[in-house]
Image (cartoon, rainbow, N blue to C red):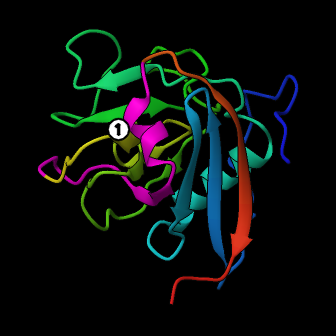
Amino acid sequence: MHSAVTDPSRTYRAAPARVIEKNVGYCAYLDTSRGIISVRLRPEYAPIAVNDFVYLAQHGFYDALTFYQLCPDATGAACPPHATAAVAGDPTATGAGGPGFTLKADPVVGDYLFGSVAMLSTDPALIGSQFFVSTGDSSHVARRYDIFGQVTDGLPALAELQKGDRILWVAILATAPEP
């Protein structure tokens, strides 16, 4: 059983050191107010984004944050253009917040299919803490944002996400690497 980090830091002075290991796979379990969503992280395609996400998750950064935006939505924070997605990872819930650092984005590999998890930033060349989960087929969206994971379980919870739903906690589990 995993529990949320009480009063986690939401601001860091520097980018994280490498916390993921080579030749190891990773799964993230997001316990949301709609249920647990399991994500297979893809360090073989997006090592910078996976390391960033794992580091922040291990330090409780995402605990108690909300899915502050559902896309497409003409009002509120920016959405990936023409995407059907749920957006989280901003402690200010404005689309402008982050962890206090940015990192160079990985090259984009793949398409934004249902359940794809990708970093989100106003500058697609940089990443911080914000991410989105495709809640529909958004394969037509321009490939600008690092795809660093794929939902593997919890599809009903993903399909039911609403603006304002909480991430209760995120747990990271090391697994076998992708074959």
Left-right relation of 162 to 76: right
**Dot 1, crowdedness within 10 Å: few (<14), some or many (≥20)?**
few
* Residue 107 shows up from this direction: yes
Q: Which span is picked out in magenta?
A: 140-162
Counting from the top left corner in percent of width and height, residue 29 is at 65, 50
State the residue position of label 1: 123
On screen, residue 142 above or below 84: below
Amino acid, disc 1: Asp
Left-right relation of 121 to 44: left
How many numbered markers are drawn? 1
Residue 76 highlighted magenta (yes or no): no
The residue depicted at 37 percent of the width and 37 percent of the height is: 159
* Residue 120 shows up from this direction: no
On screen, residue 93 above or below 25: above
Counting from the top left corner in percent of width and height, residue 134 is at 33, 44
The residue depicted at 35 percent of the width and 64 percent of the height is: 107
Residue 146 highlighted magenta (yes or no): yes
SS class, disc 1:
loop
